[in-house]
Amino acid sequence: MGRGSEIVTVFGSASPLPDSPAYNLAFELGAALARAQLTVCNGGYGGTMEAGARGAKSAGGATIGIITDFYPKKQANEWIDTVFRTADAPERLLSLVRTGNAFVVLPGGTGTLLELAAVWEFMNKGIIGPRPVVLLGGFWNRLVEGVRSHLLLEGRADASRLIQVAESCEECVAMITQTLRGGIHGSGT
């Protein structure tokens, strides 16, 4: 698979263009993950997916892209080493989740929100084992706090305990490596 046997699935937007702040953040994250000998997995297309893979390759890392026949004309970006193709978007989402030993969530739209919600709920319900989930930057903080407040008002368990927030790529990678290399992680599949 490349340098790292542990795989970090990164969720983010397909929209950012090269040299935009979001693209640059994803590039920096991909490079930081690769330097920590972690394999970068993402949806394989453009925007932050391209940037993260490109960053990982710039640091000598390995990359995985999970794409779908739902977009028949789209191909994986050129920085993806290993491509897995799924039949449809729901299968792609499940493959992205199953592949990751850890997850990083970048700013994004409804697709990224769906990815975050799936990982969060699958862990909350025990469908997948506990794995690091790190939100990079403050973009999702209000959402997480809103869910936390709602659950606490209902007297239910605080599902936000499954989520960490990092302000920098270095902090994000440190959170992931501390958890993964400390032996507290799922197997990925």
Image (cartoon, helix red, strand yellow):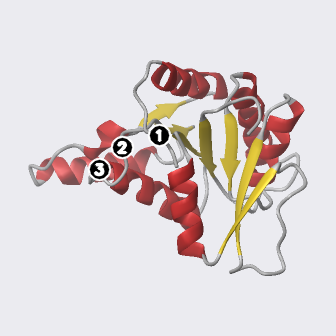
Relative height, residue 109 to residue 185 (above, below)? below
- In the image, 139: left or right of 69? left
| Identity of the residue drawn at 41% across and 48% down | 142
Task: Locate the N terminus and report the quarter of the image it occupies.
Answer: top right
Disc 1 to disc 3, C-alpha distance = 17 Å
Where residue 89 appears, x then y in whole percent?
Answer: 59, 74
- Viewer-proximal residue among 162 and 96: 96
Relative height, residue 118 to residue 2 (above, below)? below
- Under circle 2, the secondary element is loop
Where residue 146 appears, x then y in whole percent?
Answer: 31, 52
> Are circles 1 and 2 on residues that touch, CB within 8 Å?
yes
Q: Provide the residue designation for mark 2.
A: 129
Where residue 105 appears, x then y in whole percent?
Answer: 56, 46
Hey, what amino acid is under mark 3?
Asn
Q: Earlier in the sequence, mark 2 or mark 3?
A: 3
- Viewer-proximal residue among 71 and 163: 71
* Residue farthest toward the left in the current orientation of the protein: 155
- Kindly identify which numbered label has been placed on residue 108: none
Q: Provide the residue designation for mark 3.
A: 124
- In the image, 69: left or right of 111? right
Hey, what amino acid is under mark 1?
Ser
Q: Residues within 10 Å of mark 3 (few under 14, many from 20)?
A: some
- Under circle 1, the secondary element is loop
- Under circle 3, the secondary element is helix
> Are circles 2 and 3 on residues that touch, CB within 8 Å?
no
Hey, what amino acid is under mark 2?
Gly
Q: Provide the residue designation for mark 1.
A: 187
Disc 1 to disc 2, C-alpha distance = 8 Å
Q: Nearer the viewer, mark 1 or mark 3?
A: 1
Q: Residues within 10 Å of mark 2 (few under 14, many from 20)?
A: some
Q: Earlier in the sequence, mark 1 or mark 3?
A: 3
